[in-house]
Image: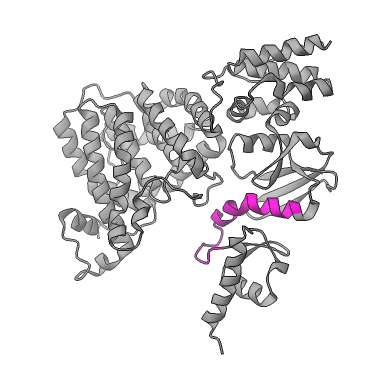
Amino acid sequence: MASPSEKLADSLEVLEELQEMGIVAIRSTDLSRTHLERLKKNGFLTEVMKGWFIPADPEEQEGETTGWYASFWDFCAAYLGERFGSQWCLSPEQSLFLHAENRSVPQQLLIRTPKGGNKPTNLPHNTSLMDTRLALPKAEQLQVKDKLRIYTPPAALVFVGAAFFRRNSTDARTVLAMIQDASDVLPILLEGGHSKIAGRLAGAFRNNGDNGIAQNIVDTMKLAGYDIRESDPFENQAPLAVVGREHSPNVTRIKLMWHTMREEIIDVFPAKPDTKPDVDAYMDRVQEIYVTDAYHSLSIEGYRVSAALIERVRTGEWNPDDNEEDRNQRNALAARGYHAAFEAVTQSVKKILEGGNPGEVANNDHATWYRELFAPSVTAGLLNVTDLAGYRNIPVYIRNSMHPPPSYESIRDTMPLLFDLLREETDTGVQVVLGHFVFVYIHPYVDGNGRIGRFLMNAMLSAGGYPWTVIPVEKRDTYMQSLEAASVGQNIKPFAEFLSALVKDNIEGKPGPQVPED
């Protein structure tokens, strides 16, 4: 007779087969009742609504949102396809978000369908679907992207309301930059006689820096006999001309975020210290703060470390054979990796203090920081040596965040862009805040992004002569919430103010974060 663990293993094999088929939204009919109940009982399935489930992590704490946010889009695509067949699509607004590579999970996902009941379907963690009874656009105005039925970029720009351009300017500008020629939107405008919308789109393209498409829309509509009056739907002028036809929408999006957010950062970030720091004295202070920095940075990521463990690692006295704390591999190896990475970062900081361009130095050295961070885990056999190869080649999700990082395919475009922006930026405060934010927004590695993001922040601080600054674990919630506001709501101010306050206190010599006594 099979043991309970053997029975669970059988059920997990069935679940694995479904996942290998790309099935995320699992119906009760996809599994036998025995397998279904066994997987539910052991925490490997969670119910989304009656008869519908998603895979779950048994170790995920109650109330945690990561599993649901990671499954949201795949679940919605499967559920809507099962319920409405092909007779549905997302709203023009949501279509634009997805074309702009903004895959943040919405509180309510708006659906158009002739079969709609005009009522919400509640989903986990205060999210929902709203199926509105509306006609679908023409077939040529629809496309399927990642199993989601959405408006094409030209159709979405035509049918979205004017308010979208004001409220979501980065997304609107990103999609405008995807339009290759006025002929992409003119057939829809002409066929529908949309003279007012044509005037709005002409104004939007002109604001975005594309006078050619704007004028072509105006001239063609006038030639067809329409009275067109150009109007600008944006509240502000584009921070840069967005007409490059970038390969990745994420490149356009990050450029826009950078140039839009920088002024808010300049307004709040403290002024540079009056005198250029002495290199040797600066490096001595960095070494003095190592234990504090390692304790708080590792604690933010959930590692359980102590000052004594960190010090043993630094002095080479780490001994897993004789010390119980050192035998806790996960924490001890994280501490060992952090020390090696910290030493690599200090060498980068020294190059910057000696006159190196901070963006150039970080571009050249950040791969070394990453390798040092995880080399001990590879040596111990907890990771494969290929895990040190570099940027991720799989999707990742940030714990409890509604922001799914950009696809791994786009990292090869967005990471060089980040270092170009850092290299060209003239304001140190902008380098500090946006260097950290954009790095974790891209999330280029499978693990270690937060730690490397904080290393990058401190490397940029050194460029302005600012002291090395520790983010306290006691302020972790504020720290993560401010990053979430920037990632999901495009609001950099909370994060800029958070870092600015820490740096200002550091400059003024106020007591900083402490390390608890062992």
Quarter of the image where the N terminus is located = bottom right
Which x, y percent locates residue 92? 72, 34
Which x, y percent locates residue 425? 38, 23
Residue toward you, 431 or 102: 102
Which x, y percent locates residue 106? 64, 43
Which image quadrant is residue 187 in? top right
Quarter of the image where the C terminus is located = bottom left
The magenta region covers 56-81
Residue 355 seen by the camera:
yes
Magenta stretch containing residue 62, yes or no?
Answer: yes
The colour scheme used to paint the residues is one colour
Which image quadrant is residue 417 in? top left
Residue 155's place in the image compared with 31, above or below, is: above
Query: Which residue is at 46% across, 45% downward?
Result: 480
Query: Which residue is at 75% across, 18% downward?
Result: 198
Residue 52's place in the image compared with 66, above or below, is: below
Main secondary structure of the magenta stretch: helix
Residue 236's place in the image compared with 394, above or below, is: above
